[in-house]
Image (cartoon, grey):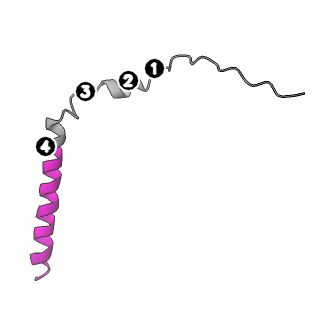
Amino acid sequence: MSVLFVVLPITLAISGIAVMSFVWATRRGQFDDLETPPLRALHDDAALPKSPVASEPS
């Protein structure tokens, strides 16, 4: 029973930190655009210019 006096405050503190982190991230705009990042992975990258390969001595 006495373990509840230790575990309950720790649980409430961790839960409070999680809620504050979520509120902070929401106010900073972390969840504003939920559609673009997954769609960005579907697009091919632009063709990168090929760098000249150094010729090896024969």
- Residue highlighted by disc 3: 33
* Alpha carbons under labels 3 and 1: distance apart: 17 Å
- Residue highlighted by disc 1: 43
- Residue highlighted by disc 4: 23
Circles 4 and 3, Cβ within 8 Å, touching? The answer is: no
- Picture residue at 15% right of the left edge, 72% below the top: 7
Circles 1 and 2, Cβ within 8 Å, touching? The answer is: yes
N-terminal label among 4 and 2 = 4
Mark 4: secondary structure:
helix
Circles 2 and 3, Cβ within 8 Å, touching? The answer is: no
| 30, above or below 39, in the image | below
In the image, what residue type sits under mark 1? His
- Residue highlighted by disc 2: 39
- Picture residue at 13% right of the left edge, 36% below the top: 27
Q: Position of residue 11 (x, y in %)?
A: 15, 65
Q: Position of residue 29 (x, y in %)?
A: 19, 32
Instruction: Tell me the quarter of the image containing the C terminus.
Output: top right
